[in-house]
Amino acid sequence: MRPTPAYAAANAGAPLVPFTIERREPGPHEVLIDILYCGVCHSDIHQARDEWGGSIFPMVPGHEIVGRVAQAGAQVSRFKVGEVVGVGVFVDTCRQCPSCKGGDEQYCDEGMTGTYNARERGTGAPTYGGYSTRITVNEDYVLRIPESLPLDRAAPLLCAGITTYSPLKYFGTKPGSEVAVVGLGGLGHMAVKLARAMGANVTVLSTSESKRDDAIALGAHAFAATRDRGTFKRLANRFDLIIDTVSADHDYNAYLSLLRLNGVMVLVGLPDKALPVSAFALVGKRRSLAGSMVGSIGETQEMLDFCAEHGIASDIELIRIDQINEAYERMLKADVRYRFVIDMASLRG
Ligand code: NAP
Ligand code: ZN
Ligand code: ZN
């Protein structure tokens, strides 16, 4: 075992503070990764504050990990010591259920094993995430980071990137598709870049009028302020696909009215409250309301390669680990442009 510096929340109300965890020596199929950068996802806040219920404490969040292989088990075939790799939202699945066998292992019937706030299959030990200096992971759940991507700006691709890439692909985004992105935060800004690269006409729907210029600079063709109720009249029946990344309560019905015939609204944002959906918002135009969770390991690799090919990476604010609590407060005010990434050198000291 290796004592490893980390930052943890002791309970749902507590700020993150320095904490030491143990990382195991890599087994035959595992790699030990020295973590260089870790992105800060809004899911880290939801879970550290136990907003979804069932959180396991102490919690070391973080599932947008980029690092370097420090040690590889004897049977590891895909990675070599020194290689730059990534770890995303999950580190294990059952490998046997129809979802796992069908290459959709993020939807494992037994539930994926989260990179943090989960229990390891077998031992039942809690998993600890990327707000730490190293992690041991089975090579089947490790990604290759293409050489051309800047490492700090690649970290958010491991969750924000794949979570938006997967539904854009699944729901058939193609040149000319009318795509709206609701919420311009970590996920939202990746959705804009990826949808644009797939050839879509992209509109950002945001509560923050101040993000208008950024939205266009990120690649959106149009921006509409959702506090202006006129927006919902003006854009009625407009979109083929809406990617809803909003982390807090909002009226789904208003956004559904923006879908054209057969349009789909995909929820990726996970507010803690159950919100009402009117049948009338769906029935009159054969609209669908869907949900989507990250993406498979195979699809995550495809997304990383797509980003390298199209020169796409996240727009980030690099922070020290001791700025993490302040970063959470800013994210709660929708004040992040557009992803915080922790420089893990600040935890090595
Ligand atoms: P984020 O960076 O904090 O961005 C969320 C954005 O939502 C904000 O920037 C803001 O955009 C908008 N927003 C916030 N409060 C709002 C409100 N009350 N009404 C309307 N809009 C509001 O968060 P993130 O990291 O992108 O994560 C977004 C959500 O996705 C979280 O709930 C997270 O847990 C979830 N998530 C899901 C998956 C999955 O697999 N499905 C994966 C990762 C994250 P504007 O300023 O533009 O309005
Ligand atoms: Zn995430
Ligand atoms: Zn499974």
Image (tube, grey):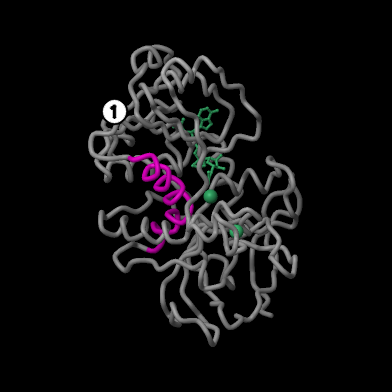
Rendered position, 238 above or below 181: above
User: Seen from this angle, which residue lies furthest bottom?
Assistant: 74
- Could you tell me if residue 349 is visible in this image? no
Callout 1: few (<14), some (14-19), or many (20+) C-alpha neighbours within 10 Å?
some
Image quadrant for the N terminus?
A: bottom right
- Residue 55 appears at what percent x and percent y? 72, 49
- Residue 324 appears at what percent x and percent y? 58, 52
Res. 349 image quadrant = bottom right
The residue where tag 1 is placed is 222
Tag 1 secondary structure: strand
Q: Residue at x 40, y 68 (%)?
A: 144
The foreground one among 319 and 47 is: 47
- Residue 131 appears at what percent x and percent y? 59, 61
Residue stretch in magenta? 151-172
Q: Residue at x 33, y 62 (%)?
A: 149
- Could you tell me if residue 284 is visible in this image? yes
